[in-house]
Image: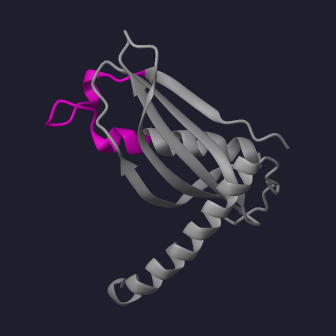
Amino acid sequence: MQNKPITFQFISEPSDVNYGGNVHGGSVMKWIDQAGYACATTWSGNYSVTVYVGGIRFYEPIKIGEIVQVEAQVIYTGSSSMHIAINVFSRNLKQPVFDKKTHCIIVFVAVDENGKKLPVPKWIPETEEEKQQEKYAKRLMDLRTQIEDEMKPFIK
């Protein structure tokens, strides 16, 4: 199965503004979830739900009126889970080059109409870059396990 990135592109709107005059982080998180959903559902061929979003890193603010590009790509698959790398870029309409503004990994699980997990096609990295991305996803899985263990006493 070919692993093509899913790319959304649009202009940030005044309704996306935060109190500082830039795009609200919550708007960016919504775009991340939407692109991740499109990528996971395309990959699995089934409805998919978000089960984890981690390490969202906002590098620079996105200005209102900039062109925004949200790119999502599978970087690891488990039996029912898909780990999606999301990168968010933006650029001034008058500039030709996009700058990276945000990055994160989001994990989706394919489910049936009753919410039961479904198997997903295995992603097999082919290029050196894809192999590095898979290693990155596996390292983050280990870190998530450590974080979850730390959080257990505080979750009720």
Nearer-the-camera pick, 6 or 75: 75
Q: Is residue 9 above or below residue 151?
A: above
At horizontal 74% and vertical 45% (from top left) the residue drawn is 43
Indicate the position of residue 104 as horizontal and vertical percent values.
48, 51
* Looking at the image, residue 36 lies above or below residue 134: above
Q: Quadrant of residue 150?
A: bottom left
Q: Residue at x 64, y 34 (%)?
A: 6
Residue 123: x, y in percent?
79, 54
- Judged left or right of residue 28, residue 125 is right
Q: Based on the displayed image, in which of its 4 quarters is residue 17 positioned?
A: top left
Q: Which residues are magenta?
A: 11-30
Q: Is residue 12 magenta?
A: yes
- The answer to whether residue 104 is seen in the rendering is yes
Magenta residue check for 59: no
Q: State the residue lying farthest toward the top.
A: 94
> Looking at this rendering, what residue extends furthest in the left direction?
19
Relative to residue 117, is residue 2 depicted above or below? above
Query: What residue is shown at x 31% (from left), y 18% (from top)?
Result: 65
Q: Looking at the rendering, in which quadrant would you find the C terminus?
A: bottom left
Check the image and name the residue furthest to the front: 128
Q: Is residue 112 left or right of residue 88?
A: right
Residue at point 64% right, 43% down? 73
